[in-house]
Amino acid sequence: MALPPPSLKGRALRLLSGREHSRAELERRLAQFEEEPGALAKALDELQAKGFINEQRVVESVLNRRSAKLGTARIRQELQGKGLAPEAVLDAVEQLRATEVDRAREVWRKKFGEPAADAAERGKQMRFLASRGFGGDAIRKVVSGGGDDD
């Protein structure tokens, strides 16, 4: 005997059990399973009222998981893609800017570990950090200063 398909709320809870999701992400992921108009919004309203969907926790989760490897620009892009409120994204970006150079230095140290021998190598290191979303000022400080604390 086959089990009935999970309800929208059940599907949402299953997604939320893996990691934090924003309401917009859940709407995108679950829209295909909505059988009657408004059912998804109602289910998500209930989950939000009970605290299962929390925008601040989504922001903290992304910062916690990604800030050690990615720069501010990439994290901002990821937060915006999750459909979070612009104010929440701005607050997170401000928080990240304070540690941008230190985070870039740590990523650089893990990947390269020693100052570039020539201009070609320096360019390679700068492009690598740029691809990770670090800002130009942070990249220049890290690559020109190597592992020094400046």
Image: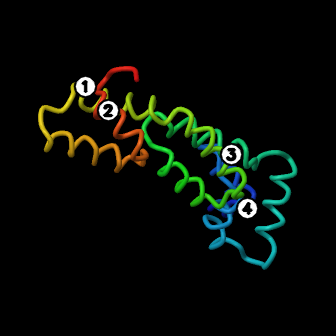
What label sits on residue 108 in the rendered view? 2
Going by the numbered disc 2, the residue's amino acid type is: Trp
Nearer the camera: disc 4 or disc 2: 2
- Residue at the disc numbered 1: 113
Q: Nearer the viewer, residue 147 or 19?
A: 147
Which residue sits at x=16%, y=40%? 121
Going by the numbered disc 4, the residue's amino acid type is: Ser
Q: x, y percentage for residue 25?
A: 63, 60
Whichever of labels 1 and 3 marks the residue nearer the N terminus, that label is 3
- Residue at the disc numbered 4: 7
Q: How far is disc 2 from disc 3 in space, using C-alphas?
A: 26 Å
Q: How far is disc 4 from disc 3 in space, using C-alphas?
A: 35 Å
Q: Callout 2: helix, strand or loop?
A: helix
- Residue at the disc numbered 3: 91
Q: Nearer the viewer, residue 69 or 57?
A: 69
Image vertical order of residue 145 relative to residue 79, above or below: above
Whichever of labels 4 and 3 marks the residue nearer the N terminus, that label is 4
Confirm or deny contact between disc 2 and disc 3 (CB under 8 A).
Answer: no
Nearer the camera: disc 4 or disc 3: 3
Q: Residues within 10 Å of mark 3 (few under 14, many from 20)?
A: few
Q: x, y percentage for residue 7?
A: 73, 61
Which residue sits at x=57%, y=60%? 81
Going by the numbered disc 3, the residue's amino acid type is: Asp
